[in-house]
Image (cartoon, rainbow, N blue to C red):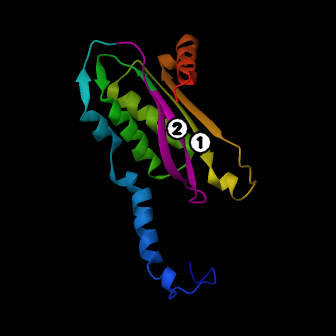
Amino acid sequence: MLIALGEDPDREGLLKTPERVERAMRYLTKGYAEDPRVIIGDAMFTEDYSEMIIVRDIDFFSLCEHHMLPFHGRANVAYIPDGKIVGISKIARMVEIYARRLQVQERMTAQIASTLFEVLEAYGVGVVVQAEHLCMRMRGVERPNSTVVTSDLLGVFQKRDTRQEFMNLIQTPGR
């Protein structure tokens, strides 16, 4: 790649670049080596609680599978348990695992929702992800102020009142 760009790979500043790029790519795609179902399953607890639980504003970084350029943003994940809750840090870890793969935001949103819904056997799950895509900011259409918002609502989150409660709660100023 360096040669194709017209660079000298023997130049002092570029000597270790191939190894650095390899290490960076291994780190940025480490989610392939992790199973979010295992992460969640190791931290499930029986609890008589059936109200909405939300982990809000989970920062993430990912790579667009089309251009391998970064996209980053925040995920909001909610569920209504049916007798089983999960350690809240595991929800953030699940977002991280799916984000650390070559992704499209739509798929990542659906993967987070369906995994949590399936593993917890929850009454419902709601996920809203908002992100900035560098493939749109620094190339192509070059729109620096654009964001993409995706959602996936499963189970009782498909009902209007539950959906509205979730949307209201994630809009509440927090940061």
Q: Give the range drawn in magenta.
A: 50-77
x, y percent for residue 130: 58, 37
How many residues crowd around disc 2 within 10 Å: few (fewer than 14), some, or many (20 or more)? Answer: some
| Cα–Cα span, label 2 and label 1 | 6 Å
In the picture, the disc for residue 165 is none
Magenta segment includes 107: no
Question: Which residue lies under the disc numbered 1?
Answer: 131
Dot 2 and dot 1 residues touching (CB under 8 Å): yes
| Along the viewing direction, whichever of 144 and 98 lies nearer the viewer | 144
Q: Earlier in the sequence, mark 2 or mark 1?
A: 2
- Name which quarter of the figure residue 79 lies in: top left
x, y percent for residue 56: 47, 29
On screen, 56 above or below 33?
A: above
Question: Which residue lies under the disc numbered 2?
Answer: 74
x, y percent for residue 42: 24, 35
| Along the viewing direction, whichever of 49 and 72 lies nearer the viewer | 72
x, y percent for residue 37: 32, 38
